[in-house]
Image: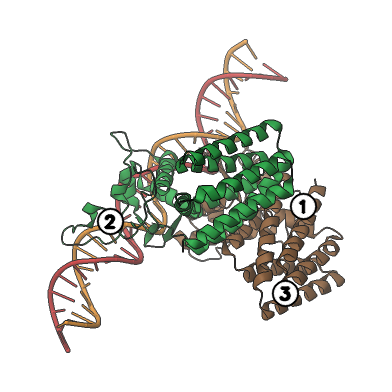
Chain colours: A brown, B green, C orange, D red
Amino acid sequence: MSSAPRDGEAGGAGQYLAESVGGRQIRETHAGPHLQESRLGRQQQEGEAGKQAAIAALRAALLSGDVVPGQRLVEAELAETFGVTRASVRAALIDLTAEGLVERIPNRGARVRVVTVDEAVAITECRMVLEGLCAAKAAEKATDDQIEALVEVGEQMRAAVADGEPMKYSALNRELHRLVREIADQPVAGELLERLHGQIVRHQFRLAMRDGRTHVSLPEHLAIIEAIARHDSDAAEEAARAHLRSVITALRETE
Amino acid sequence: MSSAPRDGEAGGAGQYLAESVGGRQIRETHAGPHLQESRLGRQQQEGEAGKQAAIAALRAALLSGDVVPGQRLVEAELAETFGVTRASVRAALIDLTAEGLVERIPNRGARVRVVTVDEAVAITECRMVLEGLCAAKAAEKATDDQIEALVEVGEQMRAAVADGEPMKYSALNRELHRLVREIADQPVAGELLERLHGQIVRHQFRLAMRDGRTHVSLPEHLAIIEAIARHDSDAAEEAARAHLRSVITALRETE
DNA sequence: TCACACAAGATTGTCAACAATCTCGTTCAC
DNA sequence: GTGAACGAGATTGTTGACAATCTTGTGTGA
C-alpha cells in the first residue's frame, strides 16, 4: 500500500482490470487491485466486525490514495478483497455515505465522492470558524501542562521545517489541531471538524506537499500557539482564522 | 398527533402499554401508541420508499414530541405502525443515528438520543460561528431583491410579536435563517446547520415558548437583517453571533 | 428472605437467495 | 456507417428465515 494519495488516477484502471475479459472491455475503475487484501487465510469476517473492518480499510484506502475520487466501489469485489460479507461492505458504504466520503447512486452503485476545489474552499471556510471557536476556547481553558505540550509541538514543527521534512510537519500539524480541540473541550466542534477533515484529506495532502507551504504555515501555527499560551481568546481565534484563510487562498491557487 | 413536544413523558408509557401482558410488566417506553399510523388499508411500503417513509415519520414524531428523548424505538413496532418492512425501519434508524438524532446500542436497540443542556450549548456555540459565517457571506452577496425579502420577513416578525403569536414568530425565525443561508450560498455551512438543528429542536421549542423570549430575540433578528441590508459583513457576523450568544444564555438558564 | 439458575419471550443482527435494474456487446435493419 | 433492439452478465436492492443476544419472570436452595 502506497503512503500517499496519487493524482491522476481517477480515470485509470489497474493493469489487469483494464484488459478485456471475455471480449468485454471493463471500463469502470474498479476497486480491486489497489486495495490491500486482508483475508490471508483467515475466516471471513461477519456482521458488525466485518463492517468496521471494511470501514477501516476504506478509510485507509482513501487516505493513501489507493482509491481515488470518482472510483467505483463495487460491493462484491470489496467483500472479496477485504474478506468480509457483501452485507458488511454495504453497511460500510452506507455509513461512509452518511459521512460525505462516498456517494451511492440508486441502482448504479457507490463511488468515492468527488470534492471540487469550490467545495473544498467552502469546507475550509467552515473549518475556519470552527477552528477559531476551538482556539478561543482553548485559550480560555488551557492549563500550564497543556500549554507546555502545545509549545513542544511548535518546536517540533520548527525543527521539521528546518530539516525539510514535510511528512513529519504534516503529522505535527494534525497533532496540533487535535491538541487544540482537546483543550477546547468542545465535542460538537470536534466532531464536525473530524467529519469535514475526512472530506478534504486529498486536498490537504496536495497542499502540504507544495514547495514553500510549510514556510507559510509554520508562523501561522506558532501564532495560534502563542495566543493560546497568553490566554488571549480573541487573538487565538483570529490566528486560527488567519491560518485557515491562508489555506483557502492556497486552495484557490490550485484551480 | 399533537402539535408540540411535551415534556415529562420520557419515563412514561402509553396507558395500554403500561399494563401487564401475560403477567409480564412492560417497563420500557415503547413507540407504539404515540405515533401516527400510516397504513390505512394500503399495501406495505417496501425498500427505499419504506425507509424514506419511516424517516419522515420519525422526523415528524421527533418534532411534534410524539417520541421523546430516551424513548425506545422498537423496529417491529415501528414497522407495523408505519406500514413498512422491518428492514426499512432498520435502515431508517441507521440513517437517523448517523445524523445524531437516534442512538443504537448493539443488541439492545435504538432510542431517541438524549441531548443535554450542556450539549445543546455546545451545539449552539457551533451554530453561532456557522450562522455568523453565513450572515457575513450574505452581507457580501445579497441582491436588492433578496434584501427586500429579508426586510419583509423582519416586518412580519415585528407584527407577530405585536400580535402575541409565538408559533408564527417561530416559523418566521426559521424562514429568516433559511433565507440568510440561501443568500450566503455556502452549502457546507447550510448542511452542517441543518444537521445541528435536528439535534436541538426540542430545546429550541422550549425556548421559543418562554415568556418574553420573542421580545428579546426580535431586535437581534432585526439587527442581522439591517447589517446584511447595509452589506456590512463584519456587523452581520457579529449580529448573528450576538443573537446566538443570547440563545446560549437562555439555554443555560433552563438548567 | 435473598441470591442464583434457568426458561420463555422479545428483540436485534445477519445473510443467502432471489428480484430488480443497469451496462454493454452483438446483431439487424436501414 | 449508424441507430435501435435484444440478450447476457454484472451489480444493486430487498427480505424472510434463522441465529444471537438480552430481559424478565419463575422456581429452587440456603
Between A97 and A245, the one nearer to me in the picture: A245
Extreme-front residue of the structure: B162
Give the labeled residue for mark 3: A150
The kind of residue on which mark 1 rests is: Ile
- Closest to the camera, between mark 2 and mark 1, is 2
The kind of residue on which mark 3 rests is: Leu
Q: CA distance from mark 1 to mark 3?
A: 24 Å
Give the labeled residue for mark 1: A248
User: At x 82% / y 69%, what residue is drawn?
Assistant: A165
Q: Is residue A248 left or right of residue B30?
A: right
Other-residue count near label 3 (Cα within 10 Å), few / some / many at <14 / 14–19 / ≥20: many
Between A191 and B175, the one nearer to me in the picture: B175
Q: CA distance from mark 2 to mark 1?
A: 52 Å
Residue A71: x percent and y percent? 65, 47
Q: Earlier in the sequence, mark 1 or mark 3?
A: 3
Q: Are the residues flagged by discs 2 and 1 from a single subunit?
A: no
Asked whether the residues under the numbered discs 2 and 1 touch, taking CB atoms below 8 Å apart as contact, a structural biologist would say: no
Q: Are the residues flagged by discs 2 and 3 from a single subunit?
A: no
Between B232 and A72, the one nearer to me in the picture: B232
The answer to whether residue A115 shows anywhere in this view is no
Q: Determine which quarter of the picture holds residue A229.
A: bottom right
Q: CA distance from mark 2 to mark 3?
A: 51 Å
Secondary structure at numbered mark 3: helix
Q: Is residue B94 left or right of residue B10?
A: right
Residue A101: x percent and y percent? 61, 51
